[in-house]
Image (cartoon, helix red, strand yellow):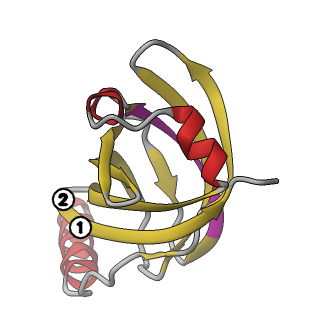
Amino acid sequence: MKYIRIVFFIAILGLVGCKTYEPLEVGKPTNLKVQALSESTVDLTLELPIRNPNIYKIKVTGIKGAAFINDKKAGNIKSTEKVKLPANSDRTHEVMLKVDYSDLISSGMSFMSILRDGEVTLSLKGSLTARSFLYKKELNFNRKSTLDLSR
């Protein structure tokens, strides 16, 4: 009886392991909020719709990259908070990011000039690390959008 359970477990693991990884589908971020502001960093939260078409749950274990405002590097973005994506889900998740905006200051841009323009082009380039059981994959992203700051 013990051996039948072991063989059954190995067979199930083999069948699930044969299913190919389908990429995550990430939607447009919404509800960008500033949580904290310091001399060189800003903590942001945003709501991000993510669809996981896979039959297993996935954890996003990290996000890292760079932020560009009007094609000038504003700083680095980083998130070490884990986001759990249930199997076959299509949900909006709250993601916390830490932005080091020291490059924005050194590029000669100021917050006042950005706010005065009323509209900025925001580009995010980087990668996120997704993990499921023993499988780990790094996915690159490159998003560009125009933000209206006049509201």
Q: Which residue is mark 2?
A: 136
Camera-side residue of 97 and 6: 97
Q: Which residue is mark 1?
A: 140
- Quadrant in the picture for the N terminus: bottom left
Q: Which residues are magenta?
A: 91-99
Q: Is 96 included in the stretch rendered in magenta?
A: yes
SS at mark 1 in the image:
strand
Camera-side residue of 97 and 112: 112
Any mark on residue 97, and which?
Answer: none
**Mark 2: which amino acid?**
Lys
Q: CA distance from mark 2 to mark 1?
A: 13 Å
Picture coordinates of residue 148, whole percent (x, y): 68, 61
The residue shown at (43%, 23%) is 41
Camera-side residue of 107 and 147: 107
Placement of 4 over or under 93, stated as above or below? below
Decide if residue 54 is on the left or right side of residue 90: left
Picture coordinates of residue 9, whole percent (x, y): 26, 69
Any part of residue 132 in sight: no
Decide if residue 129 is on the left or right side of residue 149: left
**Mark 1: which amino acid?**
Asn
Any part of residue 105 in sight: yes
Camera-side residue of 19 and 36: 36
Placement of 97 over or under 51, stated as above or below? above
The residue shown at (65%, 45%) is 116
Q: What type of secondary structure mainly makes up the magenta span?
A: strand
The residue shown at (70%, 53%) is 149
Decide if residue 7 is on the left or right side of residue 65: left
